[in-house]
Amino acid sequence: MIRVFIGYDTKLPVLFNVLQHSIVTRASEPVAITPIVLPQVRAIHDREKHPLASTEFSFTRFLAPYLCDFEGWSIFMDNDMVMLDDIAKLWALRDERYAAMVVKHDHQPKEEVKFLDKVQTKYEKKNWSSVILFNNARCKALTPEYVNTASGLELHQFKWLGNDDLIGSLPHRWNHLVGYDAPTDDVSLVHYTLGGPYFKENEDCEHADVWRKERDHMLYCAQRGELD
């Protein structure tokens, strides 16, 4: 079973639903998809919202290994994405040598403000944590107590591992940053990190039609089910 956690933002629920649909309709193996919804994890995650946090799951993503009882592997991904490939191919890249695996972007944003007028923070390993393969048993430092108290940089720069050699590399195609990476169709997972075509100002961004097509297919399937 491929266990997937997706960040959920109550202001933009459509993003979770489109990404979930894009994963399920292309998967060749069973997939269990869990949204990490902030109100649902309040019993174990009670830290106050950080002024620089741009989403409701800025910190809760790091609870994925705990939610798996620190067993097996899991995948976390941001909600502002669309899957164009079989997630089983990403799952097959698991490597026991590593505690976590990511696309190692050299992401140095130039803008000061991003979507929803949130401050654009700049730090080493920017966007590495937007797609993570967790080797859960090797991530036991990520207890709820630690995730509640560690700084944003400690978490997003993977300082909880103590050694960058424990971070494995994923092919770039599994986290293509629209608006930063060179445009390409050779991509498995599209990431609208600047805000996607669901915002008017980004309606013509790279791969905008891909997201709209996925949304429309999801709605068509839902409507067909109602008619049946």
Image (cartoon, grey):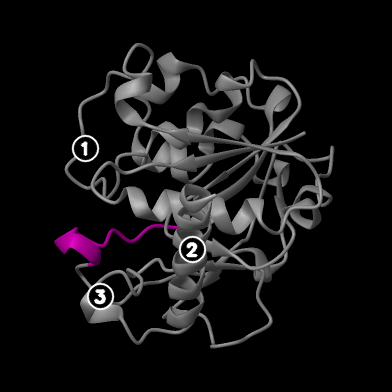
C-alpha gap between disc 3 and disc 1: 20 Å
Mark 3: amino acid:
Glu
- Residue on which the image places disc 3: 111
Name the mark on residue 138: none
Start-end of magenta stretch? 114-127
In the picture, the disc for residue 50 is: 1
The secondary element bearing badge 1 is classed as: loop
Q: Residues within 10 Å of mark 3 (few under 14, many from 20)?
A: few
Circle 2 packing at 10 Å, graded few (<14), some (14-19), many (20+), is: few
Q: Is residue 72 above or below residue 84?
A: above
Q: Is residue 96 above or below residue 194?
A: above
Judging from the image, what secondary structure is the residue with disc 3 in? loop
- The image position of residue 221, as x and y in percent, is 53, 57
Q: Which residue is mark 2?
A: 220
22 drawn magenta = no
Give whichever of discs 2 and 3 has the lower sequence position: 3
Circles 3 and 1: CB atoms closer than 8 Å: no
Q: Residue 97: where, in percent of width, then height? A: 84, 40
Nearer to us: label 2 or label 3: 2
Q: Nearer the viewer, residue 116 or 123?
A: 116
Main SS of residues in magenta: loop
Above or below for 202 versus 22: below
Secondary element type, mark 2: helix
What residue type is disc 1 on?
His
The answer to whether residue 11 is left or right of residue 144 is left
Residue at the image point whose x is 63% and y is 21% from the top: 68
